[in-house]
Image: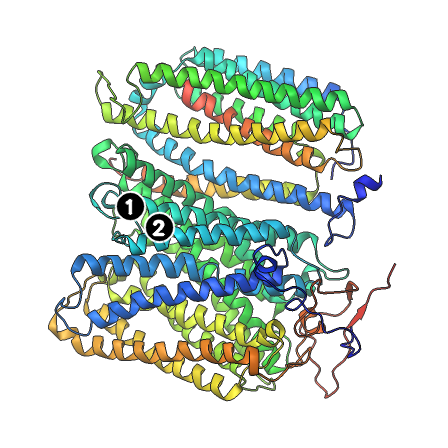
Amino acid sequence: MTTRVVSESTYIFVLLALLVLTVVTYLVSRVDLGKLNVVIALAIAATKVSLVALYFMHARYSSRLTRVVIGAGLAWLTILLTLTLTDYVTRTKF
Amino acid sequence: MSEARSYLELHFRDLEQQRETAELGMWVFLMTELLLFGGLFTAYTVYRSSYPQTFALASHELSAPIGTINTAVLLVSSFGVALSVHGARVNGRKRLLAGLAVALLLGIVFLVLKGYEYHDHYVHHQVPGLDFVWTRPQPEQAQVFFFLYFLMTGVHAVHLIIGIAIVTVLWFQSYRRRYSPEYYTPVEVGGLYWHFVDVIWIFLYPLLYLIR
Amino acid sequence: MSVDGSESERDYLNVAYGVRSWLLTTDHKRIGLLYMVSLTLMFFVGGFMAVLMRLELLTPQGDLVTSDTYNKLFTLHGVIMVWFFLIPSIPSVMGNFILPLMIGAKDVAFPKLNLLSWYVYIVGALFTFYVVVSGGVDTGWTFYTPFSTTAANTHVVSTTLGIVIIGFSSILTGLNFIVTVHKMRAPGLTWFRLPLFVWSLYATSVIMVLATPVLTITLVLVAVERAFHVGIFDPALGGDPLLYQHFFWFYSHPAVYIMILPGMGVVSELITCFSRKKIFGYNFVAFATLGIAFFGFLVWGHHMFVSGESIYAAMTFSFLSYLVAVPSAIKVFNWTATLYKGSVSFETPMLYALGFIGLFTIGGLTGLFLAALGLDVHVHDTYFVIAHFHYIMVGGMVMAYFGGLHYWWPKISGRLYPEGWAKLAALIIFIGFNLTFFPQFILGYLGMPRRYHAYAEEFQVLNVMSTAGASILGVGYLLPFTYLFWSMRYGRKASANPWQATGLEWTTPSPPPEHNFAVTPVVTEPPYNYPTSEALPEPYREAQVV
């Protein structure tokens, strides 16, 4: 329940941050950092998603139940990914 | 306010319970969508870790500039939607209508750019199943990349089209003054859906376009 | 809420007549009945496939049907029974009907979405009917690739699309129930005052919404791969068939918990009512329900021990599979402890509940056999597996369905079913069931493989026993279909609470009025507040009308 009205300047600030992060992720991808490339790309993507979820989708101001629902979705996605990968990373060859 | 109360459905105590119910329902639905795309993301992870070189080469065939522009397009459209929800809440009709219109137009821009990309891939024989040609080694691995690319962006585009339809309906309803600070649940809930479509793209973009 | 004779006899059944009032209803009770009719039809279609299979298996030779036809029979039997009967059964019929009543609500959170769920189910069922009449599908209900995507020459795409469609029905129902339980409970009805049936519907719904989308995208991938000959599951195209199995079982293992949890919820209601005693260890049962839902997501790889997953993944999944048995065992202990020193009576619903406990325990224990890596190598793809899951699904789940159906029948129809016939039917079903499926444990252990229409001579005796049992079971199933139908017209009229049970649903008339409660009840008592003395307390009072 969004009891607080989020101010417009917050939205603008979030948008600017999102656009900056997009440019950063593009520029970083032009540089060869080996394994770090994918880590940084995912970290930036996760940050952008958090900003959209917390501010545009008002998750920051929502009820605990909403946050539990979001957490459950993310947790289950993690289960799907990690348990599937336990097979693939422990095979000797694909 | 009687108009707002006329939206109260029979099985609810009050508009607040109805609003909370709608919001919870949409979040639960969005989690199902997360798992839907999650299957595709998992498949992507498995194959990228198995075919790293071919995936990188195939990724370079995508236009990173267009991908970046499209990312920005969706981010601004999300901003528009957030602004429109805010407008509904504070009785700012101009913001409500303008925000929705911005989202609608930018959504169409995204689809146009995507369509251009798809056409380009088709012309260059990069569509699996449609005369796919890959002259470098491991064509079947490249085909897996492009298959995942088309399916992931395709399923995303379908969701975006649905989002555009929703925003269009919301715009017309807003134009007809159906919403007020007492009742703007459809805008809020439709907005959540739009943001989610944006969230999916935020991950698709680096995973598909920016592989080294 | 009194059932005043001077009140008009308007209930949800006679408030409106005509096809439109049924096909356009948003009343959860009517929607529950729409599902009941559809599900019963699908049950008999799927059952018919089983009848043909058992007839074929009377003799060792494949002489009744060709092997291709047999493949289609077991495939359609599985597809129909799993997706079109078991998964929707208790949630869509009894959940829809009883859940809002049980929590003191006028309807579910999204009544129109509820009706849409039924229509989506029907569209999915039509796809299946099309497949049945136009040549069938022969891949097994598991659609393993690359056979399903490349080699099979049957209606794979239609079947998978039909399942994708009915998946949406599942997702929407689950979503509806989750939001309903969170947002529509009557005042005073805290989580720990809820009947355990509600807990189990809630846990089931969580599984539905989190697992089904993965099935959706997986079957879409299969359909695309088959239609366009490109994809990610075919080795010839650079894909991995095992990835399909990971995705398929990520859904299909939790799916078996979708199927069983509502049955367990029903059993909790029946055991308490017919022992006149509150459940032993309410909190444990509630948390065990959630535990089953959670752990059920972590074990899917135990279907793939011999498919080629890595040994370390296999060991992980085997270990986790042992963990998931614990909460189920807790529930069995707690039901048993509830019976102990209770005032037990043996009405038909109780017979089904007791049957459930015994047969589910056998089925569940044999699951532990299968979770052991070494043993699974021996019995995988044999009749041992078939017996295992039929003990749980038919001996457990279908019995719970019948138990719940009989228990809530007076509420649903306003009539009492004939108790003598019902007890006889329960007995016939129990005997027929065990005669059908116990021999299959032995057959599997002796090595008879599943999905073959012919078998070695030495297996014939046990197969004949199994088929004999199936014919008895069939008679048993026809009986309730007949007398329940009969009772709708000629059964004795039921009072509001013929079982003297606790629960808000029993405070409404039988059948309930269209909007359930004229005045929202307020709950102040714990659940299963059965008295130790004769007098039945008045646990529920009506809220003040504002």
Give the position of the N terminus of chain A as an image quadrant. Answer: top right
Q: Look at the numbered discs 2 and 1 and tell me whether their residues touch, using CB distance below 8 Å.
A: yes
Q: Is residue C379 left or right of residue C301?
A: left
Amino acid type for the residue under numbered disc 1? Glu
Q: Residue at x 22, y 16 (%)?
A: B136
Which residue corresponds to mark 2? C301
Q: Residue C104: percent from the left, percent from the top?
A: 71, 63
| Res. C344 visible in picture | yes
- SS assignment at label 1: loop
Find numbered disc 2 in the image and state the secondary structure of the residue it sits on: helix
**In this image, B174 relative to C166: left or right?**
right
Q: Quadrant of residue C500?
A: bottom right
Percent of width and height locating residue B37: 46, 35
Amino acid, disc 2: Gly
Name the colouring of the figure: rainbow
- The chain holding disc 2 is C
Decide: few, some or many residues near mark 2? Use Cα within 10 Å; few <14, some 14-19, many ≥20. many
Q: Is residue C95 left or right of residue C542?
A: left
Residue C125: quadrant of the picture:
bottom left
Residue drawn at x 30%, y 49% is C143
Res. C366 visible in picture: no
Quadrant location of residue C70?
A: bottom left
Query: Mark 1 highlights which residue?
Result: C309
Q: Which label's residue is closer to the chain start, 2 or 1? A: 2
Q: Which mark is residue C405?
A: none
Where, quadrant-wise, is the C terminus of chain A in this rendering?
top left
Front-most of C139 and C444?
Answer: C139
